[in-house]
Amino acid sequence: MLTPRDIEYFATRHGKFLHYATMLKLCPKDSPECASCWYCSRFGQRLLPPELQKHFLPVYPTAAAAVEAERKAAEAAAAAEEAGEEAVAELDADSAQAEAAAASAATKADEARAAKERAAAAQKAAEGRFLLHFDCGLRKRVQLPAVKHRPVDYYDGKAVSLDIPEAIQRRLSVRSSLTPDSAKLILVMVGLPGRGKSFIAHKLSRFLNWTGYQTEIFNAGQNRRANHSPTNHSRAGFFDPSDAERKAKRESIAMSTFEELLEWLAGGGEIGIFDATNSNPQRRALLVSRAAEWKGWRSGDASPAAGGAGAGVAGGGGARFGVSIVFIESICTDKSILEANMLSKVRASPDFAGLSEEEALSDLRQRVSHYEASYVPVADEEGAYIKLFDLSSKVTAHQVFGRMTQRVLPYMMSLHISLRPIFLAALPPGYGDASSRGDLSCEEGGCSSPNQSFALQLAGWVGRHAPSSPLRLLSSTQASAVDAARVVARDMRRRGVGCSVTNVSCLNPLDRGSEAGEDQWATQRLASMGFSQRYPGGESFADLACVLEVLIVAHATPCRALRAYFLGLPVAECMCPASSRAAEALANASRSVVELLPALFGKWSEEIHTLEERGENSEVLSLDDAVFSLEGQVG
Ligand SMILES: Nc1ncnc2c1ncn2[C@@H]1O[C@H](COP(=O)(O)OP(=O)(O)O)[C@@H](O)[C@H]1O
Ligand SMILES: O=P(O)(O)OC[C@H]1O[C@@](CO)(OP(=O)(O)O)[C@@H](O)[C@@H]1O
């Protein structure tokens, strides 16, 4: 059964969500799009399922107008016919009067015909297009205003000239030369030591892998440490730019690391992150020209004519892959941040093993001053870049185009280094994942008891374990999760701890499409699905990963997907309960909370907590606290 939230969910994911109404633009009948259309595959071509009609008030402004016009036209035609008959009847009595009546009847009949034609045209225009006005209880009923075209400014309706001024054309050609969706992307880190380059690279890699792009980091420092003795290659002197021999060695290490990256891209990788200081324009120019001449051919490959797995081919003859380079530069001038960064670096990096903290700090400072001597920030002429200033308090972007690159920018803007634990609480089966989407007993008339007891247990656990600072609680928009969040929040506030609750539909469970409700093999199937494989008429893990931007409390699938993100594990693997104890805890009825704890370098560790049979505070929470009207959610 479909619920209002199904549509809200659909609309949110498919980007056609208008505040109070959802616009579904259905495919033209029998068009090729039908085959790939989510709506068509689920509901059949252009048919509004009866269960949907039951839950929503369908308002078809154009179609309704057509029906209404048709009704009026029929009325007018009937009236005209009647008037004509009356005129004929009266013809003998008073021919002049009858003639007038007949003329008026003819006019009315003409009007009726015209109205009918208008109605038919409107009906045709409305075909395949419905405006669903839904009344889901979460949102107020609104009557959509009739859509009427009116000029919005003085450009409206005026013909355009196709002669684009030369200056604009020049800009546009640069723009379009940068826009092609290259099959491969190289992110080149730039910045002095201790500016968070490796930290950012790790975060980016985890995020991009999570969203489905094969991403790998190639770190020049790591190569140096692996292939050269630490005595001669770790101390500050090795980084002295005036020492030609050492400089050449550093260049050679960097370029061979870059070659490894290219090699990996040729083997199927999609995004390579090159982690080194890349702190001067000469080095960066070298990387750009090497990537430009590289076409994805590995030394041992057969001739270009043999083709290959290369997707989006950019560039001319014989090109195998298109590859773009974007510089990611971290600039930080805040002295106190830098001091803290230096400390964390000398404590973590093997370069400083065997030195006291003081010696290590002094060596690192000297290394930084060597780099400062030749460091030049990335300039516009060098190509595309994203620059982060002082912990992303300012972000600038230049020539950031293309599908993959555009994924990176919003992530960079929201990147932060604050440390806070994250608790994932998955609702027990029967509340989302295990049944069909939205097929919840809670949905219609309050919660069933297992859910209440889970909410009480969770509240009790949070009361005992959560910090005394305000808690931010995110839940899905499904009633069971909303309920649980509300119970926890009430309890927190009762204890005098602030708790804000946000309900977000992107935390709703994975849509299992036509397989919803087939629970006996759901877990098995879930475990064997690939990252991008979709449930028939439903969604894939990739779809889920694409919409999750905020974190916590919901149903098993989004919780497991979030855990994969934080721990940098493959989403498909984490969906399988057998893959780890934590995955199992988020998949079965064990009623657990998985705590994700920030570790060094933006990494995370996890702990599993099992909720006790009865929450500590269950006695003070009345069941009425857990049951509430969804209407109350609307401000
Ligand atoms: N955008 C940033 N600006 C400044 N410092 C950052 C930033 N991001 C992370 N950091 C901090 O920088 C510290 C050192 O990071 P690291 O990645 O080793 O630097 P680098 O690779 O540039 O030498 C980390 O402890 C991290 O907290
Ligand atoms: O070749 P450049 O661009 O100097 O960058 C590589 C160097 O960057 C450093 C700078 O300190 O990276 P990292 O901090 O990641 O270890 C050195 O270890 C590494 O040898």
Image: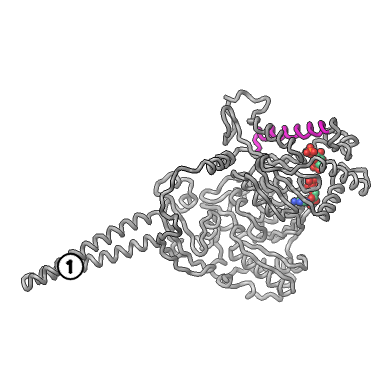
Split into 4 quadrants, where in the image is the C terminus?
bottom right
- Horizontally, residue 576 falls left or right of residue 334, namely left
Q: State the residue at coordinates (19%, 67%).
A: 80
Q: What secondary structure is marked by label 1? A: helix
**Residue sitting at x 60%, y 38%:** 182
Residue 437 at what x, y percent from top left? 55, 58
Q: Is residue 75 above or below residue 622?
A: above
**The one of 528 and 206 positioned closer to us in this rendering:** 206
**Residue at 57% in and 67% down:** 442
- Determine if the magenta segment contains residue 264: yes
The vertical placement of 447 against 325, above or below, is below
Callout 1 crowding tier (Cα within 10 Å): few <14, some 14–19, many ≥20? some
Q: Amino acid at mark 1?
A: Ser
| Secondary structure mostly taken by the magenta-highlighted segment of the chain | helix
Q: Which residue is mark 1?
A: 104
Q: Residue 615 is drawn in which quadrant? A: bottom right
Residue 69: x, y in percent? Answer: 31, 64
What's drawn in magenta, residue-wise? Answer: 247-269
